[in-house]
Each structure stands twice: as C-alpha cells, then as structure tokens.
Amino acid sequence: MPSTIAIVHYCEGAGHATRMVAIARALDAAGADVHIAGGGAGSQYVTLNGYDSYEPTVVDYITDYQEGTISDVLTGSVLNSARRITDLVSWLREIGPDALVTDDMFAAMAAVRIGVPQYILKHDTPSVYDDRLERLGAHFHCSFQSAAARTFFYPSVWTPDSLDTTDFTHVPPVALEGPDVDVPDDIDVVVVPSHYSNLDPVAEQLVDRGKTVLNVGSESWESVPALLPYLRAANAVVCSGYSTVMEAAVAGTTCVVFPATDEQVGVARHLEDLSGFEVANDVDTAVAAAEAPSAAPEYENGDIVIASKILDDLESQHTSAESSKQMISRRNILRGGAAAGAAAVGATATTVADGRKPYHFRYSRTADKSLDRTEALEEIQAALKHYGGNWPAEFRDLPADRFSGATTDVIHLTEKFKRVRGSAAIRVMQCTTTLDTSSADYRHWLWIGVDVSNSQVQTGVVRRHPTKIEPRHLRIAFAPTDGTIEHAQIASTTQIATSSCTAFMPDESPPAHPAGTPPENAASFVWQGKNTRSLSFIGICESSFPATGASWVGSQWQIVCEFRPDFPR
C-alpha cells in the first residue's frame, strides 16, 4: 500500500476542491498519507477540513474565454498554465508521492513529466459542451488524461455519452461528508450559486412566498467544511454547478438546476430525463420547481468506491513488485529483510504538511520458522548489544530440543514516512519454544526494539526545519495460525521508569491506537510513553495447539506504531 498520495484539485470553482477533499478523506481513512494542492476558490474548503494546501499559480479559462477574447485567453490563462505545471512539478518532486489523484489537466501533465502514476477524476467530457472550441479542448484534455492515467474515473448520475471515450470508469457521484451539528431542521430550500452564477433572485422570491431558505451565496453565510448535511435537511436544492448536483444526488434531495456557464448547461442537458432533477432556465421556473419538489434522487456516495479502487490497484502493483524481490537468502533474512511469506498490508497514515500531527502506520506479516537456533542467538546478541537489557534466564538456558523456530524483521521509517531522515528503525523478533506443561503447548517470545536516536523529521511546508522524532505508542499483536492463546505477559523492558508496558489477552481491549485495532484472537503487547528515543521490550505469549501430535508452523504479527515530532517546549 502506498505511503503517500498527492491530490490536486482544479482551481476554477469551489466544487473541484470539495470533491477532491472527499476522495482525500476516504484515502486518509484507509491509511494513506495525503498531501493536497490546488489553489483558487476551493482552497478554503481544504483548510476547513483540516488539511494544509499548496497553492500553485491559478488559471481562469472560464472568465477569460466567456467574458473576454481569445487574446485574453492567450495572454492570461495560457501563460499561467505553463507556470502552474512548473509549480506542480516542483511540489510533486518535493513530496515524492506514490501516486497522484487529480481532476486537473495541468497536474496530470506535471505527473507525466516526472513519472508519477496518476488517477483521474473528471466529468467535463466532450459531450458536456456545445461550443466547438470548448468541445475540442475537452477532447484534448480527456484524451491526454485518459492515456496518462491508470484509471479515469467518471462520477455522474447519468450514463456516459457516446461522444465520450469508452476508457472511462463510471462511478457513483462524489460528495463531501460532514457533521450535522448545528444544521437547522426547518430548511425548505438550500440555494447554492456557483462561482459564476447569481441565484439571489431565486432565494428572494422563495422567501417572499413563505419558504425557509438557506442561501449559501448570501453575505451572512459562513463557509462550512461540508454542505451535504444541509442538503440532506432540505426539501429541495437550487444550484448551478455540477458538484452541488452530485451532492444533492447523494443527499437524496430534489435538485433544481439553474445553469450559468456552458459547462453547467451541458450538465443540465444530461439531467433532463432523470428522476429527482429539474432544469430551469429562468427565475420563475426555478422558484416553481423548488416550491413543489419532484421525487427525490437515490444514489450512493462514490468517495469510498473510488478510494478503494485506487488503493486496490496500487496494492496489486506493490505486490507484483515485491514478488519479484522474493529471491532472498536466509542470511539476508537474518540481517533484517522480510522472511519469505511475509506480507506487508499496512502503511503510513495521517501526516500533514507541517509535520505536527502524529506519524503512524500499521504493518502485518507472517511469523514462521525461517531462523534456526544459531541464527536466532546471533540476532539476540546483536539486539542486546545495541539496546541493552537482558533476555530472561529461562530463554537463555533453554535446551536445544525445545527450540521451535524464529523470525526477525526490520522496518525502516524512512521507507514509511517521506519526511523522516536518519537511521530510524523498528526491529522485531519472535522465538517459539515448546513447553512440557499441561497448561500450553508453545511459548512465543516477542521482542520489539525502536531506535530513532539519530533521526529527524523535516517539518514545515518545504521541509526546512529538522525536528527530533520520538515514539509514543507501540503495539505488537500476535495470533497463532492455529490454536488458542492461554497466557500473555511482559517479560522485560529497557524503559520501566519512563513508560508503561502492558500485556492484553484476546478478550481484553488495549488502548485505542490511531492505526487501528488488533486482529481478532490476538494477544497485544503495548508500550506508551514519551521523552525517549530508544527502547525495547519483550512479551511472552503462550498458546495451546488444537490437535494432538500436530506442530506449530506459523503465526501472524501486527505492528502499529505512532511517532510525534518533538517540538521544543
């Protein structure tokens, strides 16, 4: 799974930003490290939803062309287009994303220039436009983006037109979800003008007719993180732009479309025969339709659909790439490479541009018998030399015939977090032994060591501020492939004075972690603390095997870690 995804929204109109923030939140929730750029009218919605945003040079083809001349287009937006591409190339190089998700043609060009895989989210295809020059432009940018993208997502409530390419992946409409706190429960109509329309006359007439109207275009309106809760509370929506149309569809609220721009007229044309939508070309028609709403639309939100498709595709690419690297020797395993059969299924999550929020990730793999006793003892000696502490005497004095296999692994934080520099690493080892008691069949010794002593995180938008990073919350969960966990305890730790180490049985709940909950039927060993940059601890987990005479062959680890920049106090 990718650790970093760049998201760029187009800068003309606010709807591009809200739509892309919806995708950002869905990716964020799934564990991706999201960075956003775009600029223009929608930037405020990026900020309102808790993200920092890079703002490249903006363009405004709609105003230059529809309110100006070809000369205005050439001397204005065309020149700014080149600047925007240059700005985005620099930004993409800075963050080094695993993929780009965008509805911006210039971001797509920037990604092609430096070889970043991309996913396109777009609705303004050739069939939307009647004007010949605008349709030609749509053909150009859609053909280019379709060829450049791994997937071209087409979110709409209508079926793609025959004028449009067959390479599009049709998905449900996308809407930005938000809390319903402080949303009035007596709204009759929500009026939502676009950046290029004025719907005040519609709002005024509806008020004159006794309707409770929420006019998003009025001076008294204060922007909110998401409009969807307000649309759900209303009986009807009057709007101009595509984005609000899609939000009304997800909200299940009748939508009256009063278009202003050529693109909005094209969108309205696609809606004419669909239930739940009315098209108005004058104020009186819009008012009448809003007063007596028709049947409500019914559509699911496409945000999670799109995020899942993107992450599944990237994971399949990652798995294919990893498969080509599986020719690895046992000695390389001993030195910290993943053992054959290891499966990394987690990644970095929730890191913002200034680096002040926690860095965290989840990582899972198979614990097996890839190390013999000699290799395991060598690895233990190396761990003790670096981290200090002691393995319990019971393990040190263990008879050779009781040893039942071991696994080791190392996770480099520089591979998980693009902003981390230095030798930051998490090392994990599992050794399994047989027991000669009736209480359990196997004892699993689980050691985890973390050292970020010589590491820093680059904070600030351009990463010019090196700051120490320290662990705050670590958890290793362990579940045998077969069998039942009978006992779990902390055996030793190098950080007794400054931290808390606790063992939890499968039926107990460990402290909540931002990277998620442990797997079912797993024992958990948790460390929580601060003011330390190097630590290690050992947990013991005992398990009983279900079948007499069968032997232990493997178990599952899940490691979750949280780190924080250590800003001066």
Image (cartoon, helix red, strand yellow):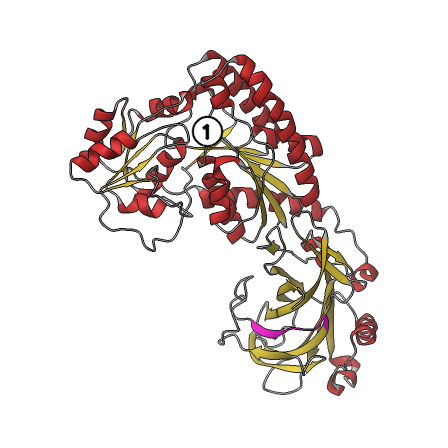
485 in relation to 456, above or below: below
Measured as percent of width and height from the top left, residue 298 is found at: 30, 40
* Percent position of residue 517, x then y: 52, 65
Magenta stretch mostly in which secondary structure? strand
Q: Label 1 neighbourhood size at 10 Å, few (<14), some (14-19), many (20+)?
A: many
Q: Which residues are magenta?
A: 522-534
Q: SS at mark 1?
A: loop
| Residue 182 appears left or right of 68 | left
- Farthest residue, direction front: 219
User: Vertical placement of 367 versus 230: above or below?
Assistant: below
Q: Which quadrant holds residue 328?
A: bottom right
Classify residue 163 as left or right of residue 455: left
Asked whether the viewer can see residue 154, the reply is yes
What residue would you read off at disc 1?
123
Q: Nearer the viewer, residue 203 or 131?
A: 203
x, y percent for residue 103: 53, 33
Tell me where residue 534 appears, x and y as whole percent: 73, 72
Relative to 321, residue 522 above or below? below
The residue shown at (62%, 30%) is: 84
Does the magenta run of residues contain 528? yes
The residue lying at 65 percent from left, 43 percent from top is: 98
Q: Is residue 123 left or right of residue 240?
A: right
Residue displayed at 48% across by 43% down = 44
